[in-house]
Image (cartoon, rainbow, N blue to C red):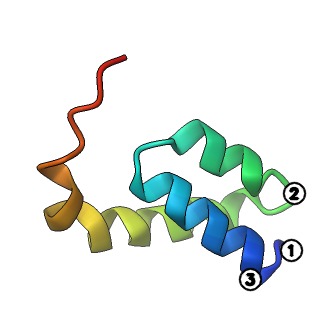
Amino acid sequence: MPTDKQIRVAELLHEIGMHREAEQALRTDLRARWRRTRRRLRLRWAGRARARRRHPR
């Protein structure tokens, strides 16, 4: 189980488009739960973040 702090860090990383880093920040033993959380985050941020999310690869 990740701590509240780990979750907050992962949410921040996720919000700025660093999805791989967010996953690593939570890479404990809870893949399924994080996957559900990620789906919620994607919904919550869909409108707000899409405009900014043109990050070059």
Which numbered circle lies on residue 1?
A: 1
Q: Residue at x 74, y 53 (%)?
A: 25
Which numbered circle lies on residue 28?
A: 2
Residue at the outermost bottom position? 4
Q: Secondary structure at mark 2?
A: loop
Quarter in which the N terminus is drawn: bottom right
Dividing the picture into quadrants, the one containing residue 40 is: bottom left
Mark toward the viewer: 3 or 1 = 3
Q: Residue 48 vs residue 55: left or right?
A: left
The amino acid type of the residue labelled 3 equals Asp
Q: Residues within 10 Å of mark 2 (few under 14, many from 20)?
A: few
Q: Position of residue 54 (x, y in %)?
A: 20, 33
Q: Residues within 10 Å of mark 1 (few under 14, many from 20)?
A: few
Mark toward the viewer: 2 or 3 = 3
The residue labelled by disc 3 is 4
The residue nearer to you, when weighing 14 against 30, is 14
